[in-house]
Each structure stands twice: as C-alpha cells, then as structure tokens.
Amino acid sequence: MTTRQRGWRLPVALIALSAVPVLAGTARLVELSGGPVLINPDARFTASPLPVAVHIACAATYSLLGAFQFLTRFRNRRPGWHRTAGRVLVVAGLGVAGSALWLTLFFPPQPGSGPLLYVLRLVFGPAMVAALMMGVAAIRRRDINAHRAWMTRAYAIAVAAGTQAYTEGVGGALLGHSGLALDISRGAAWVINLTIAEWAIRRPAATPNRRRVAVAVGGPR
Ligand code: HEM
C-alpha cells in the first residue's frame, strides 16, 4: 500500500465509524418529513421534530466533513480547503452539541436509558463546545499543536455516537439490558474515543506531520 493510500485509511475509518448513526439519522429525517417509515417512529420527535432534525443534519455534516480534516495530504496541499471546511465544522459542531443539550434537557428521557446517560450528555455536550472553542482560540494564536489536539478531542466526543453502536452490542452481551447497562455502554464509547484521541495527540510519530501543517498554514516553523 502506498503512502497516499495509507493516508486515506483514517478518514475512511472515521466515516465508517459514523455510518450507523448517520444512516439511522437519515432514516429518521425521511420518516419525519412524511416519507417511508424506515425506523421506528418516536412520538417525542414526531411531536417536535426541529431539534432532532437540527441534530441529525449538523451531526452528519460534522462527522463526514470532519473526517477529511484528518487527511494530512489534503491539509498540506489545500490549506484553504482546511480553513473553509473548518469554519463550517465549527458551526456544525456547535449545532451538534447545542441540539444534543436541547434534546437532553427539554425532551422526555430516551426510553430504556437512566440518569447516568442524562448526566453524561450534560457533561460531554458542554465539553465538546469547550473543545471547539479551545481549538478556535489556539489557531487564532497560531498554536498548531494545541489546535490539532482540541479539534481531535471535539471530534472524538462527537463520533462517540458511532462507537456507541459497538459498545451497546458488547455491553448488552456482558451487562444485560437494564437502563444502567445501556448508560454504561454508551458512556464507555466516550471513554474509548477520548483515550484513543489522547494517544493520537501524544504519539511521537505524529510530530513531523504537525510540523508540515504548521508550515502549510503559515504558523510557527
Ligand atoms: C456527530 C455525532 C453524532 C451523530 C451522528 C448523532 C446522531 C444522532 C441521531 C441519528 C439521533 C436520533 C436518534 C433517533 O432518531 O432515534 C440522535 C439523538 C440524540 N443525540 Fe446524537 N449524534 C451525535 C452526537 C451526539 C452527542 C455528542 C451527544 C451528546 C453530547 C448527542 C446526544 C443526543 C441526544 C440527547 C439525542 C436524543 C436521544 C433520545 O432521547 O432518543 N449526540 N443523535
């Protein structure tokens, strides 16, 4: 496999990770807009579709477009693209976290979930906003390493929605199907994603790429 092909592995893997919630969200949007029923109707969303529609649209944009921000070749060769996509992604990311908080605070709880998931959503929604803001602040002062670290953390928090598809399966098999088991399984997805993000941020092999990005965006050399 060539270096060019290897570079695509991460964005492809990230898109594959987000595929389950993005496809489920598309089915929900089709159902809410009066199309064929591809997913179990949910009376909470039928009664008030706006927040879930905003959430799904922003989440699909953020997870799919965001995956390409990790493509080193793209960043280096087309820094203009990285900057423009980045602005769109900050808005979409704030939309994901804001609508997630809206759904958590003002909708009846998700059937089958418990108070732990409620608290976790109240922690990780604002944490995602904070990470995005730290990422923006870092790039304004041309601190590329901090920018990369905070944007990686924000993305890791968001795409836990994809990881949850797997942790729910494993959690269901190991812990059963109680509300607490579902909450723990979903919470585990945030822990796993953030652990991988911290590893990726700190691994020494990433350093040369970061230096090239710094050069590409006119930052510190
Ligand atoms: C980019 C990643 C994300 C994707 C693709 C995504 C996708 C979705 C989808 C498709 C739904 C609708 C489920 C349905 O129709 O039954 C949903 C609901 C929801 N999501 Fe997300 N989401 C993402 C990130 C997040 C984050 C980071 C949080 C919290 C911090 C969150 C919190 C929620 C909440 C509270 C609901 C409502 C759940 C319910 O009460 O049924 N989401 N998400």
Image (cartoon, rainbow, N blue to C red):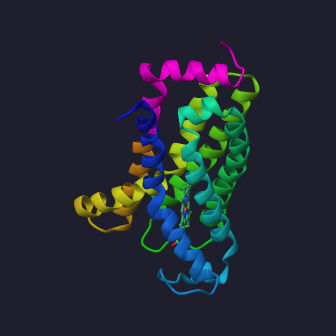
Magenta segment: 194-221
- Residue 82 coordinates in the image, percent (x, y): 67, 38
Residue 44 seen:
no
Does 146 sit left or right of 194 as displayed? right
Q: Residue at x 52, y 63 (%)?
A: 22
Does 36 sit left or right of 33 as displayed? left
- Residue in front for this viewpoint, 24 or 213: 213
Relative to 45, does residue 134 appear above or below in the rendering? above
Relative to 131, does residue 163 appear above or below in the rendering? below
Q: Residue at x 39, y 60 (%)?
A: 165
The N terminus sits in image quarter: top left
Residue extending farthest left: 174
Q: Is residue 64 magenta?
A: no
Relative to 176, does residue 95 appear above or below in the rendering? above
- Residue 164 coordinates in the image, percent (x, y): 41, 57
Q: Residue at x 42, y 72 (%)?
A: 112
Q: Residue at x 53, y 37 (%)?
A: 71
- Residue 59 coordinates in the image, percent (x, y): 60, 58
The C terminus sits in image quarter: top right
- Residue in front for this viewpoint, 108 or 51: 51
- Residue in front for this viewpoint, 187 or 65: 65
Quarter holding ligand 1: bottom right
Residue extending farthest top: 221
Relative to 58, does residue 202 appear above or below in the rendering? above
- Residue 32 coordinates in the image, percent (x, y): 61, 81
Q: Quadrant of residue 75?
A: top right
Residue 5 seen:
yes
Q: Quadrant of residue 47?
A: bottom right
Magenta stretch secondary structure, dominant: helix
Q: Is residue 220 magenta?
A: yes
Q: Quadrant of residue 26?
A: bottom right
